[in-house]
Image (cartoon, helix red, strand yellow):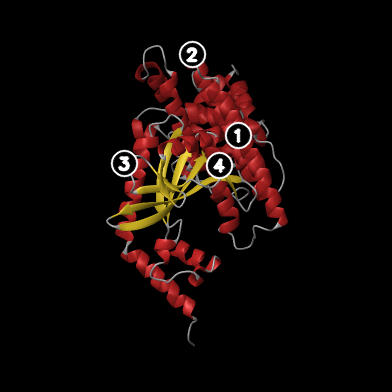
Amino acid sequence: MEKISVFDYIDTACNVLDEHSVGFSHAADRLTEYLQSTFGVLDATVAITSRIKSRDSLKEKILRNSLYKDHPAERIVFEMHDIIGVRLECRFFRDERFLYDKIRETFCVDVGDGFFSPVGKKAVRLKLDTPQPERQKNGFDIYRIDGSVTYAGEVYKFELQIKSLVNTFWSEIEHKLIYKNIRYSPADAFMKELLNSIHEELSSVDHQLNLIFDRLNGNSVENQEAALESMLTLGLNDVYSAVLRSRMGIDISITDYSEAIVYYLLKGSTYVEEMSGAGIKDLIESSLRHAAPAGNANNNYSGLLISLLNWMRTLDYGTIPIGETLNIKQPHAVHKEVSDVFLNNINSDFYLNTFFHILFSLERGSDDDDFADYIRYYADRILDGKTQEQVYRTIARLYSVPAHLLPLEKTIKMLVEIR
């Protein structure tokens, strides 16, 4: 049976994309390099990234928007406004407007049809005659600007987005819940309510991060470390609460667990140590005390703070298997009785199970390795420096602790005090 013509159209469009992949890549690189040299030096900027639509994304968009009716297959990839996507990532909501204003200041030469270029850089154009931010179909605002870049005589279109860290979280969650999930429609009432709830939660994260970030100026190293701990706790708590709500459909408080995870990340995590030979806390102290200009650690600290936020942003929150069993092997070279307490309860207590799902999503090793590292850290904290008799008493008390309280800081501190 013969296929309808749209499939030939899609095959041709994909082949054109493949044939010109080098040109698209060079154009995207040229554009990114220019934006990096112009806006990457601004304090508000976290990262500037670009991507070219994949074959699957191209097929999906052609069918979803019936683009095969608008342009010849040989030209559709050159006419598609977002065949190249560029993202200017910044810290907070307020920075989105700041960067947009900087773009308008830079792209100040009117080249016609609503497009503007920088002085002496007519190869790069942005369409700045439309109001920004624009309202999306989901009801939320976004800074999204059409543009073009000329490379080797060919004009390549692109879409520039300006997004804060929190808005990047949000768009990735929405993409995974809606556009990558054929069971749901953007018009589904439950999904709309769920997405609105997550957006409100993330908006509060942005506000909290602003408050903490603004209060860093003039603080001591110790206070800045405390601020980092508070910031990460707030961020983890709100983001993972939203993930839990999307999975469970109910609000669940995990504040104490977020605090315990952050304390572990800063004091015992192998995340940075494996790459640099130093823990996160050691790197913070070193960078604050030695790398920053004399008498002013805040500028360097800001960079470190944003790098940690960016690390959290790259995590794939949509794949965390909340509620599923964990198959953890008994680790070697760790305190077996401490390990047994956790293994005996890890799949029977919801909060303990959730704690380790979150922890494993943040760490870089396998679940077995991350569990062994955590037990080693836990045992060292509650048993280090104690006599054999004190160790016996501590382990006995550990076995009586309710499973959901095991990883909490207040429990660990209580066990540390046993003599």
Q: Which residue is mark 4?
A: 167
Mark 3 → mark 4, Cα distance in angstroms: 33 Å
Residue type for callout 1:
Val
Residue type for callout 2:
Ser
Q: Tag 4 or tag 1, which sits nearer the N-term?
A: 4
> In which quadrant is the C terminus drawn?
top right
Q: Which residue is mark 1?
A: 205
Q: Which residue is mark 2?
A: 220
Q: Which residue is mark 3?
A: 120
- State the image coordinates of residue 191 (x, y, percent, origin top left): 68, 53
Mark 2 → mark 4, Cα distance in angstroms: 31 Å
The local crowd at label 1, few if under 14, some if 14 to 19, many if 20 or more residues have their Cα within 10 Å, is many
Residue type for callout 4:
Asn
> Quarter-wise, where is residue 399 in the image?
top right
Circles 2 and 4, Cβ within 8 Å, touching? The answer is: no
In-front residue for pair 225/270: 225
The local crowd at label 2, few if under 14, some if 14 to 19, many if 20 or more residues have their Cα within 10 Å, is some
Mark 1 → mark 4, Cα distance in angstroms: 10 Å
- State the image coordinates of residue 386 (x, y, percent, origin top left): 52, 18
- State the image coordinates of residue 151 (x, y, percent, origin top left): 30, 54
Residue type for callout 3:
Gly
The local crowd at label 4, few if under 14, some if 14 to 19, many if 20 or more residues have their Cα within 10 Å, is many
Q: Is residue 296 above or below residue 97?
A: above
Q: How many marks?
A: 4
